[in-house]
Amino acid sequence: MENMPKEANEQKLTYIMKYAPIGLSEIDSSGKIISLNIVGEKLLQPVIETNNLTTENLFPILQFISPEMVDNIKNFKEENGVIFQNIVYSFCINNTISNDVKYYTFTATKVFHECIMVSCEDITQKQKDQTEILHAQVDKAIEQGKYEIASSILHDIGNAIVGFGSYLTKTKRLQEQISLENVTNLSIFFKENNTVIAKAIGADKADAVVAILNNIAEKGKSAIDEMKKAISEQGNIITHIQEILNIQRQYVAGQDSSERKLTNLRNIINDCMAMLFASFEKRGIYVTINVANDIPKIKGDRTKLMQVILNVLKNSLEAIDISAPKKTVSVNVSLETPSTVAMIIQDSGEGFDAHIASNLFKRGFTTKLSGTGLGLYNCKQIIESHNGTIEISSDGKDKGCLTVIKLKI
């Protein structure tokens, strides 16, 4: 009867060890496994199978995961104590480069001579969760950094536009002060007194003076009209850019990143062209825009649709060689059906082959040395989020490119 409590306690300890939620193994100083619980056997089984090992000795198993563990156990000279505790080791069970990486924590304790307890726990999922959280935090920090940079750039551009607008206003005031009235009056005076002046300087010279004065007056008027027109156009461009900057500021601030409003496609195309006009003009590329009068407004994210059209137009711009004999880009918008708007952008650029065509919208694919491969991928995501489609095709090298965007009304 006196032995019953002792046996019961031993049975209890055996049961606790066998069904413990972590892997437990008892070994002697040579690594021979005295006992191994259910979880321990399950955790070590992949390593055992991969390396054709047995459950007779723990050292070869630990050696595969980390030789350091075996050395620490063998070199521990104390009578008892913790050899190492909660050390994290990572390993691939196939011993090859793959995604099947395991993370285990190990603790080794010397209980007494020839009795060493080694515990292990699988923290693979926990490690993955922590990594994902870390990546999310890094991505968030990167995005925040991008927004701060974008905000700073928008601020600088805004200041530059304000400064340019001030100079343009000053130029307009100076232009308004230019008057050809005196030249015109002088020309009239010479005409009215041509006979008298001819007697003093000669008829030929008098007629020449009148002709020169008339020419100065006419060309001066033409130049002033052109200047007025140019100033007016520059003012309109500044207004467009300021509107675009306001939209981008709201986007950076996160105010309308997913907001859908009734949007005028003609205005979006005009704003995009205002931003790229100088680049097209510098390269001598002739751009035609034809938007049908019956195009209704569509419900969409103005900023993101601008992003798509800008990207496509920039691709056309960069695809046309500056020395090409034909340099054209055409934008045509029409109603394909009562509920669908079709935007067709055709360029005379270098075009592409079937291999490139099949990879255009794949994330990371690019044909540019400094490209990220995200431009067209993002464009596709944006258009599809508007329940639309985007297709880009080419008849081959040096045969241009055709982009077709369809949006639901």
Image: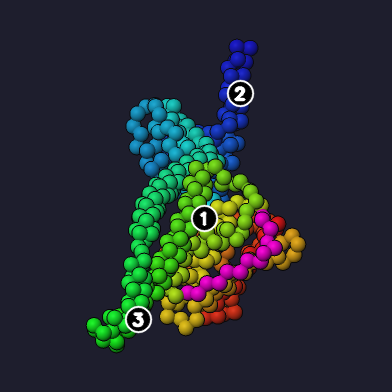
Q: Nearer the viewer, mark 2 or mark 1?
A: 1
Residue 391 found in image quarter: bottom right
At horizontal 35% and vertical 59% (from top left) the residue drawn is: 177
Q: Secondary structure at mark 2?
A: helix
Residue 375 shows in the view: no
Q: Which residue is mark 2?
A: 11
Question: Which numbered disc flags the more N-terminal residue, 2 or 1?
Answer: 2
Relative to 359, is 187 on the left or the right? left
Q: Which residue is mark 1?
A: 98
The answer to whether residue 148 is above or below residue 207 is above
Callouts 3 and 2 close, C-beta under 8 Å:
no
Q: Secondary structure at mark 1?
A: loop
Residue 389 in the image: x percent, y percent? 66, 62
Q: Which residue is mark 3?
A: 211
Residue 97 in the image: x percent, y percent? 49, 56
Q: Secondary structure at mark 3?
A: helix
Amino acid tagged 1: Ser
Q: How many marks?
A: 3
Residue pushed farthest left?
A: 200
Q: Residues within 10 Å of mark 1 (few under 14, many from 20)?
A: few
Question: Which numbered disc flags the more N-terminal residue, 3 or 2?
Answer: 2
At horizontal 49% and vertical 66% (from top left) the residue drawn is: 314
Residue 126 among magenta residues: no
Relative to 69, is 132 on the left or the right? right
Amino acid tagged 3: Ala
